[in-house]
Image (spheres, rainbow, N blue to C red):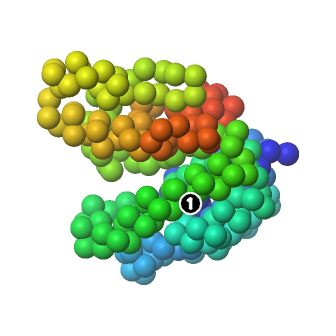
């Protein structure tokens, strides 16, 4: 049976992925520490959703883990050696990013790096899918010209200096910010998280990465 690791499994997108892949026959492992309650107060508490997942999906296992804890994240990846990873854990608020910049950076950037390093060491061939809502960057990512490569999508604006001459400032800023860390394509539901250079874990842009098929999401 295939094993899927979902970070941010208590959240809206993460919990939907738990249910979707459980129905497809996967063994699903979730990671969440209810950090949303710390960010947004009692109204942001997601324990109710965690309890729902545990009751509704018998092949779902919850792991109480902070993505900022490098040793714990890497140890979990080593233990599970998942066949695929869906990364949804994040601090999503613009306002909180300004008020709590260190927490924002540690959760979003360091947490993602910890996960990538764990995959680098223990499951380098497993695909990583990074999901987010488009509100993080607005609609600008959808206008970035991309080309499909064997294991990722690449921004033509970043790779082709001549393209900078015709790009407006808004597109240029968005593409530079995204080009190093994350590339967004036309399908907003799934996008690929990819570090600078070429980190060993292969990252796919499309739904076919996990054998989902175009009609599965």
- SS of the residue at dot 1? helix
Residue at point 22% right, 40% down? 173
Pointer 1 residue: 114
Where is residue 11? Give x, y as percent.
52, 61
Residue at point 52% right, 30% down? 152
Q: Nearer the viewer, residue 163 or 139?
A: 163
The residue at the far front in this view is 197
The residue at the far right in this view is 1
Where is residue 49? Give x, y as percent.
58, 67
- Quadrant holding the C terminus: top right
Where 205 sits versus 103, above or below?
above
Q: Nearer the viewer, residue 123 or 170?
A: 123
Where is residue 194? Give x, y as percent.
49, 41
Where is residue 79? Give x, y as percent.
78, 61
Residue 78 in view (yes/no):
yes
Callout 1 environment at 10 Å: few (<14), some (14 to 19), or many (20+)? many
Which quadrant of the view contains residue 208?
top right
The reply, left or right, for residue 9 in relation to residue 132 is right
Residue 52 in view (yes/no):
no
Where 164 sits versus 136, above or below?
above
Q: How many marks?
A: 1
Residue at point 52% right, 22% down? 149
Q: Nearer the viewer, residue 189 or 94?
A: 94
- Quadrant holding the N terminus: top right
Residue at point 48% right, 44% down? 195
């Amino acid at each position: 049976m295939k094993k899927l690791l979902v970070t941010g499994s208590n959240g809206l997108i993460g919990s939907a992925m738990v249910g979707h892949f459980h129905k497809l026959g996967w063994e699903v492992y979730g990671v969440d520490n209810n950090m949303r309650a710390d960010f947004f107060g009692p109204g942001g508490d997601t324990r109710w959703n965690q309890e729902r997942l545990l009751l509704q999906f018998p092949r779902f296992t919850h792991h109480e883990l902070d993505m900022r804890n490098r040793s714990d994240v890497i140890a979990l990846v080593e233990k599970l050696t998942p066949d695929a990873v869906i990364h949804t854990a994040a601090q999503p608020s613009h306002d909180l990013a300004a008020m709590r910049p260190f927490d924002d950076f540690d959760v979003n950037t360091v947490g993602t790096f910890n996960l990538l390093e764990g995959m680098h060491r223990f499951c380098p061939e497993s695909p990583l899918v990074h999901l987010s809502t488009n509100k993080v960057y607005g609609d600008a990512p959808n206008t970035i010209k991309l080309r499909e490569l064997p294991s990722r999508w690449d921004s033509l604006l970043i790779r082709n200096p001549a393209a900078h001459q015709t790009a407006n400032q808004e597109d240029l800023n968005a593409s530079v910010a995204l080009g190093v860390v994350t590339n967004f394509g036309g399908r907003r539901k799934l996008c690929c998280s990819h570090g600078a250079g070429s980190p060993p874990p292969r990252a796919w842009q499309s739904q076919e990465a996990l054998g989902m098929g175009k009609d599965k999401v």
